[in-house]
Image (cartoon, grey):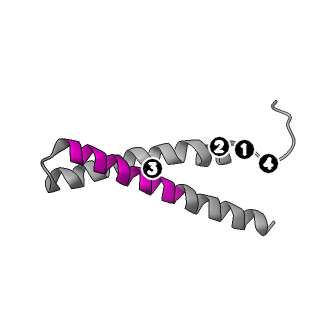
């Protein structure tokens, strides 16, 4: 395994798996802080937190996908 030829896939693995999870958690915490001052209805706040964090994560994943396609196209 240590003698494999070719570029390391560790960076791609981090970007593909860890980055979306970290972005989701960070955006969930940020939206919770923002919406805690906005609404007192806990059920609504939880649903909005989740949906907003999910949309930020999906947008980030799409941006990463576009960047990867452009980088691979130039090679």
Instruction: Judge depth for marks 3 and 4 and give the one in front.
Output: 3
The answer to whether residue 1 is above or below residue 19 is: above
- The local secondary structure at tag 2 comes to helix
Disc 4 from disc 2: Cα separation: 12 Å
Image mark for residue 9:
1
- The local secondary structure at tag 4 comes to loop
Q: Which residue is mark 3?
A: 23
- Residue lying farthest top? 1
At label 3, counting other C-alpha atoms closer than 10 Å, the crowd grade (few under 14, some 14-19, many 20 or more) is some
Q: Which residue is mark 4?
A: 7
Nearer to us in this view, 75 or 53 = 53
Query: Do the CB atoms of the residues marked 1 and 2 lie less than 8 Å apart?
Result: yes
Disc 1 from disc 3: Cα separation: 21 Å
At label 4, counting other C-alpha atoms closer than 10 Å, the crowd grade (few under 14, some 14-19, many 20 or more) is few
> In the image, residue 7 lies at what x, y percent?
79, 48
What is the span of residues highlighted in magenta in the rendered image?
43-60
């Amino acid at each position: 395994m240590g003698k494999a030829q070719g570029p390391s896939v560790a960076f791609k693995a981090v970007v593909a798996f860890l980055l979306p999870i970290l972005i989701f958690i960070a955006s969930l915490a940020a939206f919770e802080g923002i919406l805690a001052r906005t609404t007192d209805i806990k059920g609504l706040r939880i649903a909005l937190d989740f949906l907003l964090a999910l949309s930020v994560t999906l947008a980030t994943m799409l941006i990463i996908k576009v960047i990867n396609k452009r980088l691979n196209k130039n090679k």
